Amino acid sequence: MEIERLKQLAFEAGFSYAERLDGSTLKLRQEVRDMCGANTCGMYGKNLACPPACGSLEDCRKQVEKYSLGLLVQTVGDVEDSMDFEGMMEAEKRHKRQFTELAEVLRKEYPSLLPLGSGCCTICSACAGPEGECRFPDKRISSLEAFGIVVSDLCSRNHMKYYYGPQKIAYTSCYLLE
């Protein structure tokens, strides 16, 4: 599929924005992974799509270097202010639903698709980790941050805005395609 068709599929899925992602713009940084290790989100060592279960930064680098093309997608939602947790969660839920649904569509055309989402994997209501094994390894979605990617940098390198103003929240993810 050409990039314009992929972008159209993204818009049909409900995303606010979609852009071609150049695989050479994927920069994996140790300092981002170190933030995961600080466990600020509470998922470190608990979710099988998060560090350390998703592999070392070098493991992630080996995965992404196979891809030269991708699709960067965003959901932009309205919030009353920076404390509107309900508005943020509503936009995130919509983004994750759209992202998962489009991943299933794209896997038919790109069986080796690597989806990198926003936040921890939520395919299952409760992750089997850290003791168990992933129930859906073919559907598991690691986050851009779990792979050491600074989302704002990735957006700017691929001609996509990251910040839309004080009453907006943006969730960004990507699909890496071979």
Image: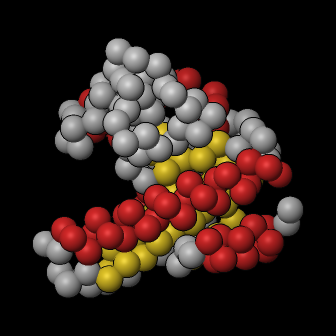
Q: Residue at x 64, y 53 (%)?
A: 103
Q: Residue at x 46, y 58 (%)?
A: 96
Q: Residue at x 30, y 28 (%)?
A: 46
Q: Is residue 153 visible?
A: no
Residue nearest the observer in this picture, 178 or 26: 178
Residue 141: x percent and y percent? 52, 42
Q: Residue at x 32, y 83 (%)?
A: 78
Residue 60: x percent and y percent? 55, 30
Residue nearest the observer in this picture, 165 or 157: 165
Q: Residue furthest right?
A: 1
Q: Check the picture and name the quadrant holding the N terminus.
A: bottom right
Q: Residue furthest left?
A: 83
Q: Is residue 59 left or right of residue 77?
A: right
Q: Is residue 50 visible?
A: yes
Residue nearest the observer in this picture, 30 or 9: 9
Q: Is residue 77 above or below residue 40?
A: below
Residue 81 falls in image quadrant = bottom left
Residue 36: x percent and y percent? 30, 36
Question: How many numbered circles are shown?
Answer: 0
Residue 140: x percent and y percent? 53, 37
Q: Is residue 164 left or right of residue 100?
A: left
